[in-house]
Amino acid sequence: QIASGESAMYRTLATTALLCSAAGAAALASHGTPGSRVSRSAIKAVATQPHVTTKSDKLFAEAKDLMPGGVSSPVRAFKSVGGQPIFFDSVKGAYCYDVDGNKYIDYVGTWGPAIIGHADDAVLDALKAQLDKGTSFGAPSPLENVLAQMVIDAVPSVEMVRFTNSGTEACMGMLRVVRAYTNREKIIKFEGCYHGHADSFLVQAGSGVATLGLPDSPGVPSGATKGTLCAKYNDLASVEAILDANPGEIAAIVLEPVVGNSGFIKPDKAFLEGLRALSTKHGAVLVFDEVMTGFRVAYGGAQEYFGVTPDVTTMGKVIGGGLPVGAYGGKREIMELVAPAGPMYQAGTLSGNPLAMTAGIKTLETLKKPGSYEKLDKLSEKLVNGILEAGRAAGHKMCGGHVRGMFGWFFCEGPVKSFADATASDTEKFGRWHRAMLEKGIYLAPSQYEAGFMSLAHTEEDIEKTIAAAKEVFATL
């Protein structure tokens, strides 16, 4: 959904082809497997190797002549943290490798999808088998039925689902169907919540918009955002005020149930419960944008974790196992408005393509195994607490938190309960911290306004190395 996290299908296919080759196999052998433990001597070696990025720098210089800003999505340009972006060569398990041969412990995970680890063997084997059958059908396939049933069984609010190719596309379809269902036009979103780059949502958005300091985007007509009203996250009174000022006019209340596009911001459960009650009272559709949180904070998403069920849910990232995907689903009476069952039109050439469906199925099968979310929770808790303790011990004001496999920190006293609170963070210090951590082999999201992601491939030793690196860096800030 966030522009920074949308994968490129053809890059994924190229990587898959490499993995099938002898050269790819040899490369993976040298990198290790997702579950392998790194020896202490190896950890020390990684931490002490000089950080050379000559090839990445050259590629970025070339890219700036070929693509706007040199990237396919804004946050990748490292503008908010300074320095030059690194160019990836390969990924495996919890690690990424750049074109200069540097190895990093990765806490971005292709912006969320790599929850079971990069290039998981079971996913790759299934993709290789599917490649022989074809990459795209443009017609129904049994794989869509399988993944659709898995989503419906897992997510409390979903009785029917429509697959798309990205989170942005899912949110566009969601917006149209809630307006069709209610016959109303206005929606309420929250400051700092990002729901893709469609015109209606680029109002006080987070993610790349916050990273670049843009209040909105040129090219968005005033009419497109006229019906978008913004409330303050974790503040029910601000929502009630909008509802009272627009009686019978609000089609939906749309939010990230755990914010990941203003940095990591956890909701008060009472806030979510209050939104559920207000939506019902005012006849508005409650929408959870679970593109980030879906299958990440719990198998049934944030709605399962917090015990609050919306009417409609958007999804992406994890359900595609690293390939481009999105989905929106909800109550049958709402979803039956979607064409061809109903009059609300939405379509997509590559929607439900067999590669994304295959990767999603294999990923969800792994996540459903006992202990998956307990492991994510344990590792995230250890990482967050270790970083906070190290930072505070060095005299830095810090706060942060996690929900299972999703986490984040801010360089401020906190607590951070809304986007306004997040803007109090020392982003200049975050930038210096990010650059120094990168040099020590730790790959973090290149923006204060992005969440971090844990995977099942991470180990206790990875966490310990990260905390040790952070201690060294905090002493220099």
Image: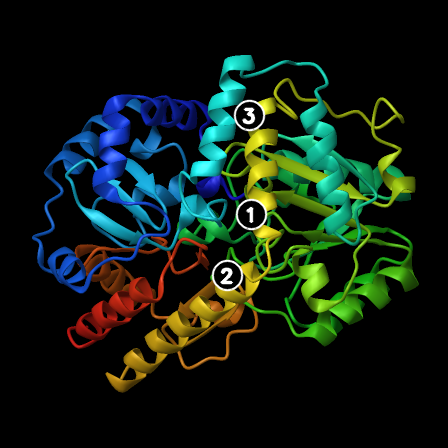
What numbered label is drawn on residue 366?
Answer: 1
The relative height of residue 213 versus residue 413 in the rendered view (above or below) is above
In the picture provided, is 26 more to the left or to the right than 310? left
> How many residues crowd mark 2 within 10 Å: few (<14), some (14–19), many (20+)?
many
Q: Nearer the viewer, mark 2 or mark 1?
A: 1
- Asked where in the image residue 168 lies, by quadrant, the reply is top right
Residue at the spot of label 2: 406
Residue 225 lies, in percent from the top left, at 67, 43
Closer to us: 54 or 181: 54
Give the residue type that dot 2 points to: Met
Q: Secondary structure at mark 1?
A: helix
Q: CA distance from mark 3 to mark 2?
A: 26 Å
Residue 311 can be seen, yes or no: yes
**Quadrant into which the C terminus falls:** bottom left
Pointer 3 or 2: first along the chain: 3
**Quadrant into which the N terminus falls:** top right
Quick check: marks 2 and 1 in contact, CB under 8 Å? no
User: How many marks can you see?
Assistant: 3
Q: CA distance from mark 1 to mark 3?
A: 17 Å
Residue at the spot of label 3: 355
Give the residue type that dot 1 points to: Thr
Q: Secondary structure at mark 2?
A: strand
Closer to us: 195 or 309: 309
Residue at the (70%, 20%) spot, across then down? 141
Pointer 1 or 3: first along the chain: 3
